[in-house]
Amino acid sequence: AQGSRQNPYYTEPTKAITVHHTAGSNNYTAAQAPGIVRSIQAYHQGQGWGDIGYNALVDKYGNIYEGRAGGLDRGPMGAHVGSFNSNTWGISMLGNYETAQPSAAGVKAMGDIIGWKSVQSKINPMGSTQLTASGNFTGSKYAAGQTATFPTINAHRDFHYNTCPGDNLYSKLPIIRANAGAKYRALRAGERVGVEAKP
């Protein structure tokens, strides 16, 4: 049940958010970034994935892109972590962070969108959750039906034997979680202020 751009398949509630990198070039301008997102879309659709495998993407300039059609505030099922695409939301940073350092703007944007998504999905960005493998996926650390506990904000390598999102971005996960937590608290405080302001 991959779904398509016109007919997304929803898997809700979103329980966890997985960080990726595209492993592509780090040498791109802000003007080139949307074209890179489009080329990823063409490649992923060519794999038969219906649309971009990630729900969202971030570039090194801090711009955020919708990946999988169906609404950033919803849970259209992506194709980002084999056997763990149910109830997870994937976000990828454009570039290869095995070789490069992620930009401060990219890390901040990732924390901001994850914090926003955490409010939308009512999940704690500093917490953890249980997820169950839906099948046997080549390269997965978990067999079909196996359940494990993961950080709410996790990385592709937590599920599969790979290096995604690269050591340099992986090492920034504590900062991304902290940024997401700050954004989450600010948005929640704003919600409460809004409620109290009503007559």
Image (spheres, helix red, strand yellow):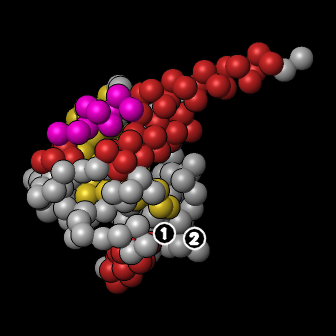
**Amino acid marked by disc 2:** Asn
Question: In this picture, which residue range is highlighted in magenta?
Answer: 171-179
**Dot 1: what SS?**
loop
Q: Which mark is residue 152?
A: none
**Residue drawn at x 50%, y 73% as measured from the top left:** 4
**Which x, y percent locates residue 83?**
27, 55
**Farthest residue, direction right:** 199
Residue 159 seen from this side: no
Q: Residue 107 or 120: which is nearer the viewer?
A: 107
**Amino acid marked by disc 1:** Gly
Question: As drawn, is 152 to the left or to the right of 64?
Answer: left
**Which x, y percent locates residue 68?**
47, 64
**Residue drawn at x 19%, y 61% as measured from the top left:** 96
Up-down: is 121 above or below 69? Answer: above
Rate crowding at label 2 as few (under 14), some (14 to 19) or many (20 or more) other CA atoms within 10 Å.
few
- C-alpha gap between disc 1 and disc 2: 6 Å
**Dot 2: what SS?**
loop
Up-down: is 122 above or below 58? Answer: above
**Which x, y percent locates residue 186?**
55, 26
Q: Are marks 1 and 2 in contact (CB under 8 Å)?
A: yes
Which residue was labeled with disc 1? 3
Up-down: is 133 above or below 3? Answer: above
Q: Which mark is residue 7?
A: 2
